[in-house]
């Protein structure tokens, strides 16, 4: 029997399918090499944002949320700097 993708000759009792492209009869995707698996190539700059925490009372957060409208909290604070 031949693999329908790469036409590699497959042993009829091979339960794992084609060893070249692993397409025929593959029962599980756990382990092994898969197309497009692994880390994607990034820009090479890493993270460009520094995350910080702001501690305020619940009343202060409510005022901030009322004033900021549809902007995110971070974008609103940044626009005020």
Image (tube, grey):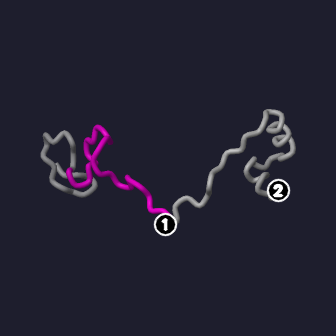
Residue occupying the far top of the picture = 58
Which quadrant of the view contains residue 36?
bottom left
* Residue drawn at point x = 26 percent, y = 49 percent: 22
Mark 1 vs 2, N-terminal side: 1
Q: Nearer the viewer, residue 11 or 16?
A: 16
Task: Please tell me whether the stretch drawn in magenta is mainly helix, strand or loop.
Answer: loop
- Residue at the spot of label 2: 80
In the rendered image of this protein, does residue 75 appear above or below residue 29?
Answer: below
> Crowding near pointer 1: few (<14 within 10 Å), some, many (20+)?
few
* Residue drawn at point x = 84 percent, y = 46 percent: 69
**Is residue 12 in the magenta section?**
no
- Residue at the spot of label 1: 44
* Residue drawn at point x = 73 percent, y = 40 percent: 55
Apparent side of residue 64 relative to residue 26 in the rendered image (left or right): right
Q: Nearer the viewer, residue 11 or 67?
A: 67
Number of numbered discs overlaid on the protein picture? 2
Q: Position of residue 30 (x, y in %)?
A: 31, 41
Q: Nearer the viewer, residue 16 or 67?
A: 67
Q: Position of residue 6 (x, y in %)?
A: 25, 57
> Crowding near pointer 2: few (<14 within 10 Å), some, many (20+)?
few
Local SS, label 1 = loop
* Residue drawn at point x = 41 percent, y = 55 percent: 39
- The nearer-to-camera label among 1 and 2 is 2
Q: Which residues are magenta?
A: 19-42
Label 1 with label 2: CB-CB less than 8 Å:
no
Q: Position of residue 14 (x, y in %)?
A: 15, 42
In the rendered image of this protein, does residue 19 appear above or below residue 63?
Answer: below
């Amino acid at each position: 029997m031949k693999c329908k993708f790469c036409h590699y000759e497959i042993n009829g009792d091979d339960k794992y399918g084609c060893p070249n492209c692993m397409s025929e009869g593959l029962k599980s995707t756990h382990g092994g090499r898969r197309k497009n698996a692994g880390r994607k190539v990034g820009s090479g700059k890493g993270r460009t944002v520094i995350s910080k925490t702001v501690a305020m009372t619940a009343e202060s957060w409510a005022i901030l949320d009322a004033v900021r409208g549809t902007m995110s909290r971070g974008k609103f604070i940044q626009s005020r700097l």
